[in-house]
Image: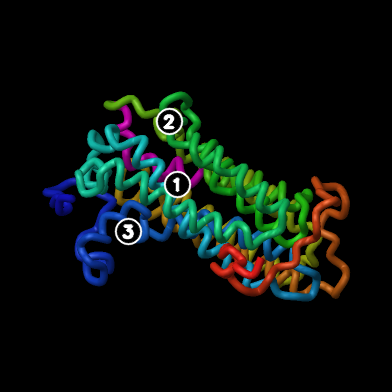
Amino acid sequence: MTDIPRQTGGHTDIRRGDWIDRLLPATLRPYARLARLDRPIGTWLLLLPCWWSIALAAPAGSWPDFWLMALFGIGAVVMRGAGCTINDIIDHKLDAQVERTRVRPIPSGQVSLLQAFLFLGAQCLVGLLILVQLNLFSILLGAASLILVGLYPLMKRVTWWPQAFLGLTFNWGALLGWAAVRGSIDWPALLLYAGGILWTLGYDTVYAHQDRRDDEQVGIKSTARLFAADSRRWVGGFYAGAFCLWVLALTPLTMGWTVLVPLAATAGLMLVQVRGWEMDDPADSLSTFRAARFTGWTLLIAIMAGIAAMPPGSHGGGGSGGIQFNSLPKPQMQHQMLRLADFAPDNRR
């Protein structure tokens, strides 16, 4: 394992002297960076759709299950890290040719491919232990998302729309969170999911503008290259569509000021992000991309406030119109982590 090379100039997404350098031993630092623990923005963008649906599926007049939200939080950290590891394994040769990514752990030689695969296996095992805390429908739904996680890194080679595929992948939690609470997929979850896909199309187009020139040289496809100078208009359209779908998802809520104010903030934040974005400045593209998390937070506040303000028993959340597995047990969260003893052989038999 080699030391992290020093970037002599230009734009890189790895910071030196951060908490990883200060707190972790040298042998663990490359793995923390491989899992993007130094850049939690991706975890937030993966986690927030989960929390939206957990909150929207909660009983009227109540707060969401905070234990379930915490469980999804741990899962988001682990599985976002696994997704980044898969991406870096597949893209390590391309990453070596792009200024921003050439100092990542695999292309810089800090982590070998074998070590990366072993690390990936460990992350997936932890993710599995978290997933089996949920009901059977959620376990099957969560396992299905692994197909998307594995395919996403290949999309930039075959389509100009890899950001759309990322949207399908990153917002899967909008379906999974609802399923973990209700044991089904109903129309509010589908609307949250569809809105999340458009939201991701917007913010990841912004993100891809950091590498647009390098991507042209190495043949990587993206919506940033496809839209080029028209990207601002496209991103604005994606954000507008996302907002409309989210409003439709929230129609069962009582639209009092506790919902309307954070919803207005959600729209305002997206407008400010689009209008203020300097698309030819890589640093500003990264900053605008990171600001997307505030949009997700204000939407979460609107959902939580709206559900809490409703009279108990008034929130059906889509009734029987969704995809349901009635033969499966309804979700009953065990408010404890899975014990290792549950896997141990019973010597009394």
Tell me the kind of residue under disc 1: Gly
Let me know if residue 213 is in the magenta part: yes
Mark 2, other Cα within 10 Å: few <14 / some 14–19 / many ≥20? some
Work out whether mark 2 precedes mark 1 in sequence or the reverse, and give the earlier one: 1
- Mark 2 → mark 1, Cα distance in angstroms: 15 Å
Residue at horizontal 46 percent and vertical 24 percent from the top = 158
Residue 206 vertical position relative to residue 218 in the rendered view, above or below: below
Work out whether mark 1 precedes mark 3 in sequence or the reverse, and give the earlier one: 3
Residue at horizontal 77 percent and vertical 59 percent from the top = 182
Range covered by the magenta-colored residues: 201-216
Residue at horizontal 33 percent and vertical 42 percent from the top = 210
Let me know if residue 145 is in the magenta part: no
Query: Quick check: 31 left or right of 79?
Result: left
Tell me the kind of residue under disc 2: Lys
Mark 3, other Cα within 10 Å: few <14 / some 14–19 / many ≥20? some
The quarter holding residue 346 reads bottom right
Which disc number belongs to residue 32?
A: 3
Q: In terms of depth relative to the viewer, which is nearer, 210 or 6?
A: 6
Q: For the C terminus, give its image quadrant.
A: bottom right
Which secondary structure lies at badge 3? helix
Query: Quick check: 323 left or right of 141?
Result: right
- Mark 2 → mark 3, Cα distance in angstroms: 25 Å
The x and y percentages for residue 51 are: 62, 62
The residue at which mark 2 appears reads as: 156
The residue at which mark 1 appears reads as: 83
Residue 148 vertical position relative to residue 195 in the rendered view, above or below: above
The x and y percentages for residue 343 are: 58, 62
Work out whether mark 2 precedes mark 3 in sequence or the reverse, and give the earlier one: 3
